[in-house]
Amino acid sequence: MQPHDLLDLLGARRLLAIVRGDDPAAALRSIDVLAEEGVTLMEVSLSGADALSVIRKAASTLGAGVHLGAGTVLTARDAVAARDAGATFVVTPGLGEGVDEALRLGLPVLAGALTPTEVISATARGAAAVKLFPASAGGVSYLRALRDPFPAVPFVPVGGVGLDSVRDYLEAGAVAVGLGSPLLGDAPRGGDLDDLRRRVRTALDLVGAP
């Protein structure tokens, strides 16, 4: 996948599902449900239990139309491990060495940034898009403020984005939104998959994904 491919997918699908849990088997079941319901962009956070194994197993079974990334990539070692496990893109919470190593490996990066200086650095490094994180620090009004000096930067708010604020962020100019626990709930920890299905259908309706 090339950087423009990730950006195109974010713009088309408008939803990045973030899977993080302490039960690898439940995380895999959650990924299956996401794919069955039509979610085609997913991130498995490396802070979850046995995350690399989850990525490896999911990457081997998901169809070609589903794109699986690794999240919470902090170090160069994380980036290499994510690539080796089968991740096709990388998501970071900030601008650590994981960004540079992932780009060196040819993996598109959704790079975490919050301040204007960090946004400038993320784009200068070659990030496909900027993960506005934590979005809850400034909310929708902060995204609008950033859009004034950075109208061409594709922002993906993550962290504190709930189903009730999805449309507000998109209307404020976000190219997509990242949803973790507000979407997945307790499913990656063994929770109710039917509840997950209902939330996924609501989220896809909110983002207007085809």
Image (cartoon, rainbow, N blue to C red):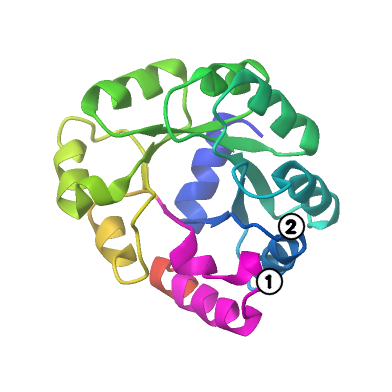
First along the sequence among labels 1 and 2: 2
In the picture, the quarter occupied by the N terminus is top right
| Residue 162 horizontal/vertical position (percent) | 35, 65
Residue at horizontal 46 percent and vertical 78 percent from the top: 202
**Residue 85 located left or right of residue 44:** right
Disc 2 is placed on an element classified as helix
- Name the disc covering residue 24, or none: 2
* Vertical placement of residue 50 versus 124, above or below: below
**Residue 121 located left or right of residue 15:** left
Residue at horizontal 69 percent and vertical 61 percent from the top: 27
Q: Residues within 10 Å of mark 1 (few under 14, many from 20)?
A: some
Q: CA distance from mark 1 to mark 2?
A: 14 Å
Residue 120: image quadrant is: top left
Give the residue type at disc 2: Pro
**Residue 128 located left or right of residue 172:** right
* Vertical placement of residue 138 versus 113, above or below: below
Range of the magenta residues? 176-203
In this figure, which residue is indicated by the disc labeled 1?
Answer: 33
Give the residue type at disc 1: Val
* Vertical placement of residue 203 versus 41, above or below: below
Disc 1 is placed on an element classified as helix
* Vertical placement of residue 154 versus 14, above or below: above
Q: Is residue 20 visible?
A: yes
| Residue 173 horizontal/vertical position (percent) | 27, 50
Residue 197 colored in magenta in the image:
yes
Residue in the foreground of this view, choosing between 105 and 149: 105
Residue at horizontal 57 percent and vertical 76 percent from the top: 196
Residue at horizontal 23 percent and vertical 35 percent from the top: 151
